[in-house]
């Protein structure tokens, strides 16, 4: 039998996971600009609803920073 842990994330923890959620959503999109399979696995493991993070303008910032940092 597999043990499960129920996580209760506060505001700080949720905010820290925004970039992970955005990268996971982008990875799973039709034409992803970034691919981060580990972000997808983290989101699945945490059973997070990431739809709420799609509305943030920071989405484009996370994607831009990821593209820039992945080049170096």
Image: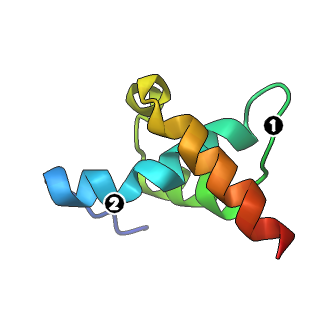
| Residue density around tag 1, few if under 14, some if 14–19, many if 20 or more, within 10 Å | some
Q: Position of residue 31 (x, y in %)?
A: 85, 29
Mark 2 or 1 closer to N-term? 2
Q: Which mark is residue 24?
A: none
Q: Which mark is residue 16?
A: 2
User: Does 36 appear above or below 32?
Assistant: below
Q: Position of residue 60 (x, y in %)?
A: 59, 37
Instruction: Report the quarter where the C terminus lies.
Output: bottom right
Quick check: can you spot residue 34? yes
- Element under label 2? helix
Q: Position of residue 24 (x, y in %)?
A: 62, 46
Instruction: Report the quarter where the N terminus lies.
Output: bottom left
The residue that mark 1 highlights is 32
| Position of residue 41 in the picture relative to residue 10 (left or right) | right
Quick check: can you spot residue 8? no
Q: Nearer the viewer, residue 49 or 31?
A: 31
- Element under label 1? loop
Residue drawn at (81%, 37%), measured in percent from left and top?
Answer: 32
Looking at the image, the residue that sits furthest to the bottom is: 72
Q: Are marks 2 and 1 in contact (CB under 8 Å)?
A: no
| Position of residue 67 in the picture relative to residue 63 (left or right) | right
Give the mark count. 2
| Position of residue 48 in the picture relative to residue 22 (left or right) | left
* Corner quadrant of residue 39: bottom right
Q: Position of residue 25 (x, y in %)?
A: 62, 37
Q: Nearer the viewer, residue 72 or 22?
A: 72
CA–CA distance between discs 2 and 1? 22 Å
Residue drawn at (44%, 22%), measured in percent from left and top?
Answer: 55
| Position of residue 68 in the picture relative to residue 9 (left or right) | right
């Amino acid at each position: 039998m597999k043990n499960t842990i129920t996580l209760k994330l506060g505001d700080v923890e949720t905010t820290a996971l925004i970039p992970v959620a955005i990268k996971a959503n982008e990875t799973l999109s039709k034409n992803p600009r970034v691919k981060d399979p580990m972000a997808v696995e983290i989101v699945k493991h945490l059973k997070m609803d990431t739809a709420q993070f799609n509305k943030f303008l920071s989405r484009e910032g996370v994607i831009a920073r990821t593209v820039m940092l992945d080049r170096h």
